[in-house]
Image (cartoon, rainbow, N blue to C red):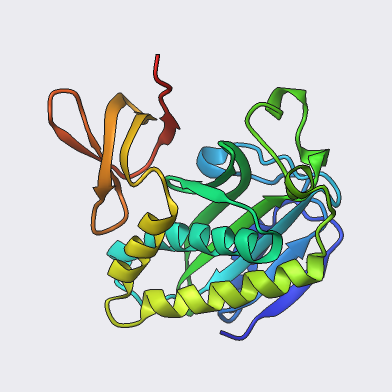
C-alpha cells in the first residue's frame, strides 16, 4: 500500500477528516495525522482525550477488497498492527482486549475506531488509531485504567520512527487480510496475541443486555464468543467487554 500522510497541528477528529476526504474521492492509503484533536472520539461516540502532542492521532482511508461480512476484522487486524509496533519499537509486552483496545499490564495504551462510508468510488473504511505517547492524555480518573508509552518505557517515542513502523506493519497485515484465506489468517494472528481469546472470565455490556461468562474463541466475522454459566454460546458483535476478576 502506498501511504500519503497529511499532517495537521489541530483537527476536530482525524477520522472525521479522513471520512470527508474519502467522500471526495481520496485513494486508499491517505492518512490524516494531527498533533491535537478537539473532538476525538472512540467507540459508541465516546470522547477520546486528545491533548496536544500527548498521543498519536492517525486515521487511514481504506477501500478493502473483501466480503462485507469480514469488514469487522479490520479492527482486529489493526489491533494486531499496534501490538506489533509496541513490541518492535519499544520491547513492550501488550495484550489485546476485544475488540479494539491494546493494553499493557491491563491498562489501555491504544484504541482503534473503524467507520464505514459509501462514497462515489465505492465503500470506504476509515481506521482511526490513537496511541497514548505520554501522560498528557491521562487525567487522575483515568490513571487506574490507562497508560502511555512514556510511562512504560521512561522515554519519549520518536514519532517518525513510530509512524514508519506503524505503516509498515499495517501494509503487511492488510495484505494478509485481502489475500487467500485472509480472514482466517487474521483471526489466528489476533488469537495468538490476545489473552481474551479463550478461557477469560468477562462481562459484555450490550445495548439491551449484559452477558457474563467465559470467552471461547471468535466467530468467522470476528465476533467474540462467550460461554455462559448455562452453557449457552453468545456471539458478541458489538459492546463493551471487561475482564471479571476472581473473588
Residue 1 place in picture, x, y as percent: 56, 84
20 is higher (above) or lower (below) than 115: below
At 61% from the left and 86% from the top, the residue drawn is 2
Residue 18 place in picture, x, y as percent: 64, 65
Front residue of 136/37: it is 136
Residue 113 place in picture, x, y as percent: 54, 52
Q: What is the quadrant of residue 232 in the picture?
A: top left
At 55% from the left and 72% from the top, the residue drawn is 170
Q: What is the quadrant of residue 90 in the picture?
A: bottom right
Q: How many marks?
A: 0
Front residue of 157/4: it is 157
At 64% from the left and 53% from the top, the residue drawn is 92
> Looking at the figure, which quarter contains the C terminus?
top left
Residue 41 place in picture, x, y as percent: 63, 44
Front residue of 205/187: it is 187
Which residue in the rendered view is the most extreme toward the left? 231
121 is higher (above) or lower (below) than 83: below
Which residue in the rendered view is the most extreme toward the top? 247
Taking the image as drawn, is residue 172 in sight? yes
Amino acid at each position: 500500500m502506498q501511504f500519503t500522510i497529511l499532517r495537521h497541528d489541530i483537527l476536530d477528529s482525524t477520522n472525521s477528516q479522513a471520512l470527508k476526504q474519502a467522500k471526495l474521492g481520496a485513494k486508499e492509503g491517505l492518512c490524516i495525522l494531527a498533533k491535537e484533536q478537539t473532538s476525538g472520539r472512540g467507540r459508541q461516540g465516546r470522547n477520546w482525550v486528545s491533548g496536544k502532542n500527548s498521543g498519536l492521532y492517525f486515521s487511514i482511508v481504506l477501500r478493502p477488497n473483501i466480503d462485507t461480512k469480514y469488514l469487522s476484522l479490520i479492527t482486529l487486524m489493526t489491533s494486531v498492527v499496534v501490538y506489533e509496533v509496541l513490541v518492535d519499537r519499544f520491547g513492550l509486552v501488550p495484550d489485546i482486549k476485544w475488540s479494539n483496545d491494546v493494553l499493557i499490564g491491563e491498562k489501555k495504551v491504544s484504541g482503534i475506531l473503524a467507520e464505514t462510508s459509501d462514497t462515489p468510488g465505492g465503500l470506504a473504511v476509515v481506521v482511526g488509531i490513537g496511541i497514548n505517547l505520554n501522560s498528557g492524555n491521562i487525567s487522575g480518573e483515568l490513571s487506574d485504567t490507562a497508560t502511555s508509552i512514556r510511562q512504560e518505557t521512561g522515554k519519549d517515542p520518536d514519532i517518525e520512527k513510530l509512524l514508519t513502523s506503524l505503516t509498515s506493519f499495517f501494509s503487511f497485515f492488510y495484505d494478509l487480510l485481502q489475500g487467500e484465506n485472509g480472514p482466517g489468517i487474521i483471526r489466528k494472528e489476533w488469537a495468538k496475541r490476545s489473552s481474551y481469546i479463550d478461557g477469560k472470565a468477562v462481562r459484555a455490556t450490550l445495548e439491551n443486555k449484559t452477558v457474563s461468562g467465559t470467552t471461547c474463541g471468535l466467530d468467522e466475522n470476528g465476533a467474540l464468543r462467550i460461554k455462559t454459566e448455562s452453557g449457552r454460546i453468545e456471539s458478541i458483535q458489538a459492546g463493551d467487554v471487561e475482564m471479571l476478576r476472581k473473588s
